[in-house]
Image (cartoon, rainbow, N blue to C red):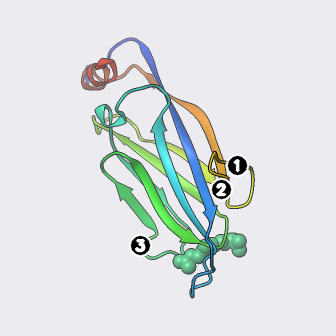
Amino acid sequence: KDRIDTTLTKQIVYGNISTKLAEKLPNGHTHRWTIYVKPYNVEKLSNFIRKVQFKLHSDYENSVRVVEKEPFEVVETGWGEFPVQIKISFIDQSERQAICSHYLALHQPEFIEDDGSIVVVKEVLDQIVFVNPTKKMFDVLNDK
Ligand code: SLL
């Protein structure tokens, strides 16, 4: 296949936020959390990302969640922390998927928001490196 002799990178942020529920739910859940993949720069991830798959703990119904449009996130409630596998698929399906893992955080690190509420945020800045991207990928990666 026609590939471009260059290397491009895209900075992304992935992780989770979590807040403690005012009251424990009947199912024992104590927290509401969101796990996400977002752009670091001001750009639309959907320009080059087709879908993001979040593989949750098998406790969850339909534990493999596929998100096909922005925001690439899953909102859930729960009581426990566990590793989430995040798999990113690109617009050109011949581009190999990017896989990362995030250990969901419910308790630490805590931040106090302006309104006084306590929120847990745990995220990392990472980059996706496209070595010799396909012509199609090259074009969408350069589209501002
Ligand atoms: C732990 N090893 O024991 C981990 C497992 C699983 C978290 C955490 C409830 C999900 C549901 C939930 O939060 N499970 O009820 O569907 O800490």
Circle 1: residue type: Ile
| 77 over 67 or under it: above or below | below
| Ligand 1 contact, mark 2 (Cβ < 8 Å) | no
> Which residue in the protein does label 2 denote?
117
The quadrant holding residue 135 is: top left
> Which residue in the protein does label 3 denote?
62
Q: Work out which residue is located at the far bottom of the displayed protein and give it.
A: 26
Tell whether label 2 touches label 1 (CB within 8 Å): yes
Q: Residue at x 57, y 57 (%)?
A: 84
Q: Work out how far the residue at label 1 is from the one at label 2, CA to CA, in angstroms.
A: 6 Å
> Which residue in the protein does label 1 denote?
112
Q: Nearer the viewer, residue 118 or 42?
A: 118
The quarter of the picture where the N terminus appears is top left
Q: Secondary structure at mark 1?
A: strand
Q: Nearer the viewer, residue 135 or 117?
A: 117
Circle 2: residue type: Ser
Relative placement, left or right, of 36 versus 134 is: right
Query: At which x and y percent is residue 26?
Result: 57, 88
Few, some or many residues within 10 Å of mark 3 (<14, 14–19, 20+): few
Q: Work out which residue is located at the far front of the displayed protein and give it.
A: 115
